[in-house]
Image (cartoon, rainbow, N blue to C red):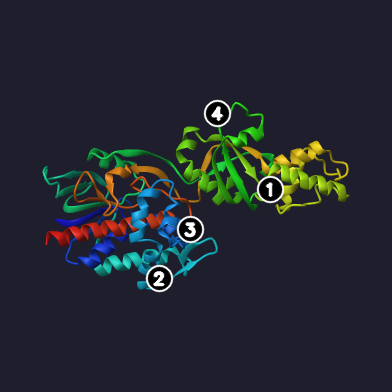
C-alpha cells in the first residue's frame, strides 16, 4: 500500500514527489515510469542544456505565453512562478543563468545538472522510482468516496490513497483518464516549423532576421491579390525568423504554430503565409523611399542594399521582383520597385507540411481545463486524483514556459495533497 503514486517519471512527476516528500516524509511515495530512463525530455530539452524556465517574473505577463491555459494559470502563477523555480534549484546548489532572450539555463549548460538534482533529492527523501513500469489501468476502489485507488502495471497491482497523473502527452494515459470520466480535448501538435520549398529562400539556410509573419485566410476569394490577402489575416507574430533547409523556423514561426495549433491542423498544414522582412516599413512608405533612392543612386539595385535586411536575402528578393543583376536604380521602373516593395513587405509563401521543432514535441490537448481545480490541480470529478504538466490541456510557446507549467502544476498538486493530509489530521 502506497500513500502517493505518481504516474510519469518526467519533470512534473519528480517535482511533485520532491515537494510532497519534503513536507510529509512519513508518506510512502513512488514514481512509476514506463521507460528505461526517467526525465528523458529534460535531458534533450534546450539542445541538451535544459531551458528550465523563463525570466518573466510577473504572473500576468507570464501567463500570456500559454495559448491554452492563459486564464487558468494566472492564479497558480501568483502562488508559484519563475522566481520560485529559481529559488528551488538554487537552494539545492543548482544556479541558473538568464540569456539575452530571457531563457534560463543551468550555469553548467548541461541538462544532466537538473537530472542529477532530481535523482539526488528523491534518493535523499526516500521516494521510490520504478522504471519499465508501464501503467495499463487505474480504477477507484471505494465507489462512494473514491479515496483509494488501484493502479495496474504490466507486472504489478499497486494500491494507493492518492494518484498524480504526470504522464505528459501520452495517448494511453489520456484514454485511462477518459475511462475514469474525464473529457479529453483531442491532441494536435503545437510547436513545429513550416516546410516551404521556394527559390527565394532555397540557397540561404541558416540566415536569421527579424520579421513579421501572418497566416493568410485559406478561404480567401482574392488569392491573386496579396494586399487583399494580408487584410484577411488569421494569425500574426513577429520576432526572429530562421530560414532552414526545409523551410522556416525561429520564434516568429513557432509562436504561430502554438497559437494556431488547431487552425493549422484543420488546414492539414497546407496554407499561405505573408512575411514582412522589414517590420519598420509598410508598402506605401517603402515605395516612397525607393523612389527617392532612384533619384540619387546610380549603382545596380542588387548591389545597393538600402535596408537592414541580410545581403543574400536582399539579392534573392530583388531577383524575385524581376530586376536583373545589371539593372541600375535610374533604369528600374516604378512597377519593378512596386514588385520589390511587395517582396519585402508582403512576401507570400506556400507552406506544405510541418516538422517537429528540434527534439521537442509539444501538443495542444489533454484533460479538459474546466474539470481541474487550479488551486490544487485536483480533479473536480474524482477526489484524490491530481494532474501535473502537459497531461492537461495547457501548452506554451518555446522559451522555458512548458517546463514552468510543469513546475507550477507539480508544486500545487503537492500542496493539494499536503493540505488534504493536514486537514485529515
Q: Earlier in the sequence, mark 2 or mark 1?
A: 2
Is residue 73 left or right of 256 when viewed as pictured?
left
Binning the other alpha carbons within 10 Å of mark 3 as few (below 14), some (14 to 19) or many (20 upward) gives many
Disc 4 on helix, strand or loop?
loop
Image quarter in which the C terminus is found: bottom left
What is the quadrant of residue 367 in the picture?
top left
Is residue 33 left or right of 203 when viewed as pictured?
left
Q: Which residue is mark 4?
A: 219
Residue 154: x %, y % from top left: 23, 46
Binning the other alpha carbons within 10 Å of mark 1 as few (below 14), some (14 to 19) or many (20 upward) gives some
Asked whether 327 or 279 is in front, the reply is 279
**Disc 4 vs disc 2: Cβ atoms closer than 8 Å?**
no
The extreme top residue here reads: 221
What is the quadrant of residue 37 in the picture?
bottom left
Q: Earlier in the sequence, mark 4 or mark 2?
A: 2
Q: Which residue is mark 3?
A: 46
Marks 3/4: CA–CA distance: 37 Å
Q: Confirm whether residue 183 shows in the render.
A: yes
Amino acid at each position: 500500500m502506497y500513500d502517493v503514486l505518481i504516474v510519469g517519471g518526467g519533470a512534473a512527476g519528480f517535482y511533485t514527489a520532491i515537494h510532497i516528500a519534503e513536507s510529509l516524509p512519513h508518506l510512502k511515495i513512488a514514481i512509476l515510469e514506463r521507460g528505461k530512463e526517467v526525465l528523458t525530455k529534460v535531458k534533450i530539452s534546450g539542445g541538451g542544456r535544459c531551458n528550465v524556465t523563463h525570466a518573466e517574473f510577473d504572473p500576468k505577463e507570464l501567463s500570456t505565453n500559454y495559448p491554452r491555459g492563459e486564464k487558468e494559470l494566472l492564479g497558480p502563477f501568483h502562488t508559484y512562478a519563475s522566481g520560485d523555480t529559481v529559488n528551488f534549484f538554487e537552494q539545492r546548489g543548482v544556479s541558473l543563468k538568464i540569456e539575452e532572450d530571457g531563457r534560463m539555463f543551468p550555469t553548467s549548460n548541461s541538462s544532466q545538472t537538473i537530472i542529477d538534482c532530481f535523482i539526488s533529492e528523491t534518493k535523499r527523501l526516500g521516494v521510490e522510482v520504478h522504471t519499465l513500469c508501464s501503467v495499463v489501468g487505474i480504477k477507484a476502489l471505494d465507489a462512494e468516496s473514491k479515496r483509494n485507488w488501484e493502479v495496474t502495471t504490466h507486472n504489478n497491482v499497486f494500491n494507493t490513497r492518492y494518484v498524480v497523473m504526470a504522464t505528459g502527452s501520452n495517448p494511453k494515459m489520456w484514454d485511462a483518464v477518459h475511462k475514469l470520466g474525464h473529457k479529453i480535448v483531442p491532441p494536435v501538435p503545437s510547436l513545429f516549423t513550416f516546410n516551404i520549398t521556394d527559390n527565394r529562400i532555397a540557397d540561404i539556410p541558416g540566415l536569421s532576421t527579424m520579421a513579421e509573419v501572418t497566416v493568410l485566410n485559406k478561404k480567401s476569394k482574392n488569392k491573386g491579390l496579396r494586399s487583399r490577402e494580408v487584410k484577411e489575416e488569421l494569425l500574426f507574430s513577429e520576432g526572429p525568423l530562421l530560414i532552414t533547409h526545409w523551410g522556416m523556423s525561429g520564434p516568429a514561426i513557432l509562436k504561430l504554430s502554438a497559437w494556431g495549433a488547431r487552425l493549422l491542423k484543420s488546414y492539414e498544414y497546407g496554407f499561405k503565409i505573408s512575411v514582412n522582412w522589414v517590420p519598420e516599413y509598410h508598402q506605401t512608405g517603402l515605395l516612397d523611399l525607393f523612389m527617392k533612392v532612384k533619384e540619387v543612386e546610380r549603382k545596380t539595385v542588387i548591389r545597393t542594399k538600402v535596408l537592414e535586411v541580410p545581403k543574400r536575402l536582399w539579392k534573392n528578393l530583388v531577383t524575385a521582383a524581376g530586376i536583373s543583376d545589371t539593372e541600375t536604380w535610374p533604369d528600374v521602373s516604378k512597377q519593378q520597385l512596386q514588385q520589390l516593395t511587395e517582396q519585402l513587405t508582403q512576401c507570400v509563401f506556400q507552406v506544405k507540411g510541418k516538422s517537429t521543432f528540434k527534439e521537442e514535441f509539444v501538443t495542444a490537448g489533454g484533460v479538459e481545463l474546466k474539470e481541474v481545480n487550479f488551486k490544487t490541480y485536483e480533479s473536480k470529478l474524482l477526489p484524490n486524483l491530481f494532474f501535473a504538466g502537459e497531461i492537461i490541456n495547457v501548452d506554451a510557446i518555446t522559451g522555458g514556459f512548458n517546463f514552468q507549467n510543469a513546475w507550477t502544476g507539480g508544486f500545487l498538486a503537492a500542496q493539494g495533497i499536503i493540505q488534504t493530509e493536514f486537514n485529515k489530521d
